[in-house]
Image (spheres, coloured by chain):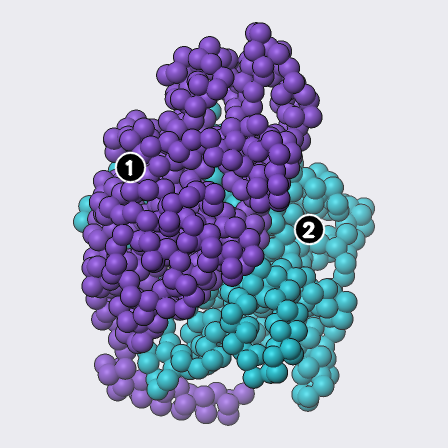
Chain colours: A cyan, B purple
Amino acid sequence: MLGLDKKDTGLLLVVVVLALFAPFILNLFPTNSGMAFFNGGYPDLMQRFAIFGIFAIGFNILFGLTGYLSFGHAAFLGVGSYAAVWMFKLLNFNILPGLVLSVIAAGLLSVLIGYISLRRSGIYFSILTLAFAQMMYAIAYSDLLGRWLGTTITNGETGLQIYNDDPQILLGNGPNVPHLFGLEMRSKVDLALGPWNFTFPVGYYLCAILLILAFYLSIRIFRSPFGLMLRAIKSNQTRMMYTGLNAKPYTLAAFVISGMYAGLAGGLLAAMDPLAGAERMYWTESGAVVIMTILGGVGTLIGPILGAGTIKYMENIISKMNESLLDSWFAFLPDWLQHAVVWVATWFTGEGWHMTQGLLFMLVIIFLPGGLVEGGQKLTGLFGRKRAQTQTKTEPAE
Amino acid sequence: MTKTLSRRGVLKTGAVAGAGVALPTIFTASSAAAFTNEPTGSTVTLGFNVPQTGPYAEEGLDELRAQELAVQHLNGEGDGGMMNTFSSKALKGNGIMGKQVKYVTGDTQTKSDAARASAKSMIEKDGAVMINGGSSSGVAVAVQGLCQEAGVIFMAGLTHSNDTTGKDKKANGFRHFFNAYMSGAALAPVLAKEYGKDRRAYHLTADYTWGWTQQESMAAATEAMGWETVNNVLTPLASTDFSSYITPVLNSGADVLVLNHYGGNMVNSLTNAVQFGLLDKMVNGKKFEIVVPLYSELMAAGAGENVQGVIGSMNWNWQLQDEGSKAFTKSFGEKYGRPPSNSAHTCYVQTLLYADAVERAGSFNPCAVAEALEDFEFDGMGNGPTTYRGADHQCFKDVLVMRGKENPTNQYDTLEIVEVTPRAQVEYAPDHPMFAGGDLGECNPGA
């Protein structure tokens, strides 16, 4: 189907089902039950799942296929956001021009950064991309560009927002919130089924459709001759050069493609929430996408989506567990035990969610080097009919 | 494959048909409620969005303590704190409008993105009707914009930049904290009195919005007193070593160093300056002085004995002797075993003021609440008679000028009050040039 073989079609269907039924899958628990805390099916988080899924899929095209570990992809995310918000400020709240410009802007920037950084490989490449991204961050944070031009470009640390006195030359009587030809991103439909409440946000479904398209494109790239060439670069670049092939155009193309994915993700972030801040470019954000990809499974198709979902879920749910909540959960224990359990748990919840993330990451790296995807395969190998497949085994990055 | 497909097909058709029949009865558009997150049950949820990790985590955790205390007092537990001294008596200690107050917390990480994500989850998932707290002006401006779009009330917390109630002001947002302009207006006369009117000031400024407005305000206020501004050097926010910025100060002919820094920046730059022996120098025949426009207890504790003798300004301090401050310090101290910081006070007071405004408005509708808060005058919450100005949603009250204590008796006793600057001296017109360019817009009830 759609030029895919049977296995890939299955994978695509899994993603389609996950994406379209996310409002059900993420709201497993009835609204008023104690477990409702673990529900993740509210618009903002679902949008983040899809958007960071796109970001990680794009990153995986570079890192998973060529083995080039970019440590500066957040720069493209940030540039995408700024581009989209500027379109809102200048034209109107229709997200289409914003999304298009965000992809173009991130693409142009990635040509520039990629052209310079790809002169080196391995750790030197990583450091170069990191340096460029931090440079972009510093420029955005202090609005150096804006000050140089004598105007506002990034609005510094406050972040770029839309004001009532912005030009918005096409606004007219159109909606005052981001929309796609009148369809407001913030609008949603609620469905109450007995004790369950499900929310279907318009914005999320736009992100989900783009996620599915992005995923389909990434399958096609993985299975194309171009993808094969990228894999060849990863396995032995020197040998490729000796056979007379110039690897650089291929790596640059992969870099630009993944940069454009990041730009699209950045544009979508701004489309869901019309603000662009400099922290989006900070190196920790670049690190987060690396972690997402490795956690899910580098070089696998669906891994990055799973990784992005896991990290974003932890960031938004575990970080909200506070001490009083834990107290109420463990209230059934004897007093002294309750205090002990809560004391331990506070290290891993609330502000300690980074600790949980770190632990999970270490466990995955040590026991499942192929990421969550490998975990899933091991499980199906244990309980399922088929033996675990070794196809997704990853080679370490150079 | 074909078998499963056909079975799936049947199931699908059935599901779609069923859904189609049921559609009109079970789908509700979100515009059914009168405003965002209208509380319908016996409880009402407030969202406390503070930095729990990152550079301002200490401030955030103290804000959280104060907010938990405020919820207790609203629900009639504990000794009631400032509810007993508050001039408005609308609050009864039975929650807000008879609804028990619950709260959810989130971590802003001192990043606009994370702060908006956490505020959004409070609004979309937990049904919070109000977002309170936070440190850093960038975060406050970002979350204020979000609350305006979503249609909930935002009470700002620790944000000192002029922009929060200046060019970035929003109809759904209110700020209890003072701002950079007020710091300048309060500090300048004290500085002129202590150090003389013929001084040459050298500014080191954190290179972001707050630093810029702080520097602008300080320069304007001190120049009006007759001081001369020798130079202003912007320092990157991520700097930890300011030695290279301090050396030129010695050769500039300046005799006062103004550190427009906050948090870790301020601790480091002040420590560097003291280590370079600036405070022991004599320049132009006068003793060299250092000024830190915005102080906080937690920063003073971080800088240790380096703050001794250094002058700065604060919103509130636990050493104030009015009834409200005493009551709050007492109940906070009893619960947590330490005096509250000025950010804790701000967040505590904002929670009570929101609850009181709801009671007086008789509705949780953000537009009604905003109307009740606009131009509201009250007393008994520390700082004497206080007004929430309707024109820009900025709070006006007395400002404290503080000095690092020479002989601290314990770890919390690091600052002493030099002067309580009366409110009239720090007031300004809503269209003051430093605050110009903003637009409150219309209040948004959401939904």
> In which chain is the residue bearing label 1?
B
Image quadrant where one finds the N terminus of chain B: bottom right
Image quadrant where one finds the C terminus of chain B: bottom left
- The local crowd at label 1, few if under 14, some if 14 to 19, many if 20 or more residues have their Cα within 10 Å, is many
Residues B380 and B19: in front is B380
> Residue at image x 68%, y 78%?
A377
> Residue at image x 41%, y 48%?
B325
Q: Left or right of A76: which side holds B167?
A: left
> Residue at image x 40%, y 91%?
B10
| Residue B300 visible in the current orientation | yes
- Number of the label disc, if any, that sits on residue A66: none
| Residue A138 visible in the current orientation | no
- The local crowd at label 2, few if under 14, some if 14 to 19, many if 20 or more residues have their Cα within 10 Å, is many
The residue wearing badge 2 is A69
- The x, y position of residue B231, in whole percent, is 51, 16
- The x, y position of residue B7, in whole percent, is 46, 92
Q: CA distance from mark 1 to mark 2?
A: 44 Å
- Asked if labels 2 and 1 touch by Cβ distance under 8 angstroms, the answer is no
What amino acid does circle 1 point to?
Gly
The residue wearing badge 1 is B438
Depicted A209 relative to depicted A253: above or below: below
What amino acid does circle 2 point to?
Leu
